Amino acid sequence: MDEHRELRVFLHLAQTLSFGRTSQDCHVSPATLTRLVQRLEARLGHRLFDRGPRGVALTAEGRRFREYAVAALDLWHAYRQGEVDPGELSGRLGLFATVTACQAVLPDLLAPFRAAHPRIRVDLRTGDAAAALARLDEGEVDAAVAAIPGRLPASLVSRTVAVTDLVFVAGTGGAGPGAAALEGPFVLPRRGLVREAADRWLRGRLPWRPEVVSEPEGHEALLALVALGYGTGIVPRMVLETSVMRDRVRVMAADPAPAPLEVGLCVRRADLRRPLVAALWSLADQSVAGGTRREWVRRSRGALIRMRFRRRSCRVDGVMSNFVPGIELSRAFYGEVVAPLVSGVAHSAALIGPGSEVLEFDTARSADHDWGPRVLLFVAAERVAEVEAKVVAGLPDRFGGFPTVFAYHERVRPGVTVVDLGGWLVDRLGFDPRQGVSLLDWLSAPWQRLAEVTGGEVFSDGLGERGLEAARAALRWYPPDVWRYVLACQWQRICQEEPFVGRCGEVGDELGSAVLGARLAREVMRLALLLRRRYPPYAKWLGSALARLPGSAELGESLGAAVAARSWREREAGLSAAYGRVAALQNRMALAERLDEGVRGFFDRPFQVIGAGRFVQALMASVSDPVIRGLPVTGCVDQLSDSTDLLVAPGRARAVTAAMLGLTA
């Protein structure tokens, strides 16, 4: 079978997910089809399909290979027809948007893209707005038009393409003043940014807990329930103006009005290097860089929706604020003050390391101490003293309303720290990742430190191929086998305690059960972040990191219910739901054998567990490195201990990890 025939058969199977149907439609025997898939998997070194009790599913590598196969066949057909143009982009681009975005935003967004790149096929998918960023983050699509949260995950970037009000609506048949309708009952979205905005507005206005009578999944379902008189709802005005239900509901005046919702084109940061994604992104980027705001106006029943490309405003807890996030302050500080002082000096400049602003968890509260314009300036070791003297002498007294010399970690010093990159990395991590990262390096580096080095923002990287970006790239995420090992150890922590929540409760120890439930909730939160390639931050920001994770709302609800439960059975139910969600996430990531996601009894006792040991075994079985496969299932330093004194001292962390795992290098 020729290569292009193989690709066509693979694409058919990827679409139908049925070996029987593909065998019949493509006129190949089941045995031949199985051998074809096995040959492809052997050549690629990855499994393309998972075959389990629930049927056939594409793995993550299978989805990537599907993109390649589509592009390869497109180029082949163009060549055969004599149409190939080396300078013309072609292939398929996966795009997610809600039905409303398809109607109100995509025509203006995609028209110039279609004109500039007619050979790029757009695979458009629609669905629940709350799941948009999760589908993008997990690699199901290449781009998404979605509502932009106040803080995007560091792995994603966005460009605002629309701004719309959030409006409260009630049925047209209701009587009474608008104020009464805004006191409830309410029909609110089950999850997502609109629900978060509604909750904030209601908390600030009503002295009692609002009555929520229904929590539908989509805006159209919400509008239907509102039109039927079930209660007052909240939707983006853009949704209302394009809805078939708009004549059956009325807008309620709210004072103050909820903050507007911004809709943006979102892509994965790493994908900006891919030609098709870069082509789509550049159109939005050019509109912003042009210096004038581009607007589209949609009029419907006298209402106005303003759509434009523009940068996002600063928000604190979803409310417009004058607070300037630390990264923005430091970026401007470098560009306007520091960069001119070091003109002609080879350097890298960034805001990385400790500080809530580095991981973008800062709010106005953060400015009450250890706060000001900060820049880390990396130069050659022999020039540190010279450059530091020059920079300190040239700093203004204040920038952006803040002093440039201020108390930071109990020392008064300039906001610019001049250091040698290698020395700084060794001080923070215990090693220099530019020299290579050993197994002990990976497992002894605390998650918080890895997040601090790979997070933040690099303002300039003029140290060449061995500069700051090279160090960050080396630490971006665990190698595949190390990742599987760390995940296995995280499941092991759940395995060791999951039946105890019920056992404590059974003997009347609800306090002990609650403590165990909270411990397990923390382990699940960490597991969810690790599955989504996020280094879990330390305790203060763990919940914020999970909440920022696309698609985490339902997991957060389950864990919240478990922690707030007053009885062990309610606690067990919340944890069971959470276990199922992380199990499903692992199956989607295709890191190991696909396993049943349901909970089961713990032997013959009346306790429900996920059977976390199953996931430990499956992950360890998928590890190919014999050294890693031979390690005890105890884990990295964060899984060995949560002692702050240990985790902030690289030498101690390295010694403990080496001793526990029997590693020497």
Image (cartoon, rainbow, N blue to C red):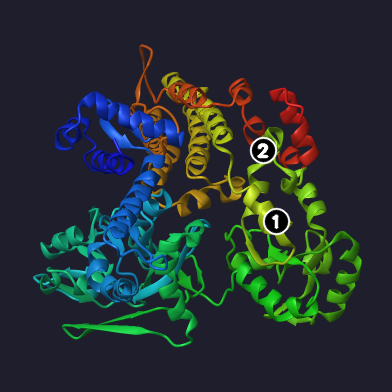
Q: Residue at x 53, y 57 (%)?
A: 154
Q: CA distance from mark 2 to mark 1?
A: 17 Å
- Towards the viewer: 368 or 293: 293
Q: Is residue 202 above or below residue 632?
A: below
Q: Nearer the viewer, mark 2 or mark 1?
A: 2
Q: Position of residue 283 (x, y in %)?
A: 41, 74
Mark 1: which secondary structure? loop
Q: Is residue 605 visible?
A: yes
Q: Position of residue 523 (x, y in %)?
A: 52, 35
Q: Position of residue 247 (x, y in %)?
A: 11, 74
Q: Amino acid at mark 1?
A: Gly
| Residue lying at the far top of the rendered structure | 604
Q: Which quadrant of the structure image shows residue 589?
A: top left
- Name the disc covering residue 442, or none: 2
Image quadrant for the C terminus?
top right
Q: Position of residue 149 (x, y in %)?
A: 43, 63
- Towards the viewer: 371 or 472: 472
Q: Which quadrant of the structure image shows residue 79?
A: bottom left
Say whether marks 2 and 1 touch (CB < 8 Å): no
Tell me the crowding category of disc 1: few under 14, some 14 to 19, or many 20 or more residues within 10 angstroms, Cα based.
Answer: many
| Residue lying at the far left of the rendered structure | 173
Label 1, on which residue? 353
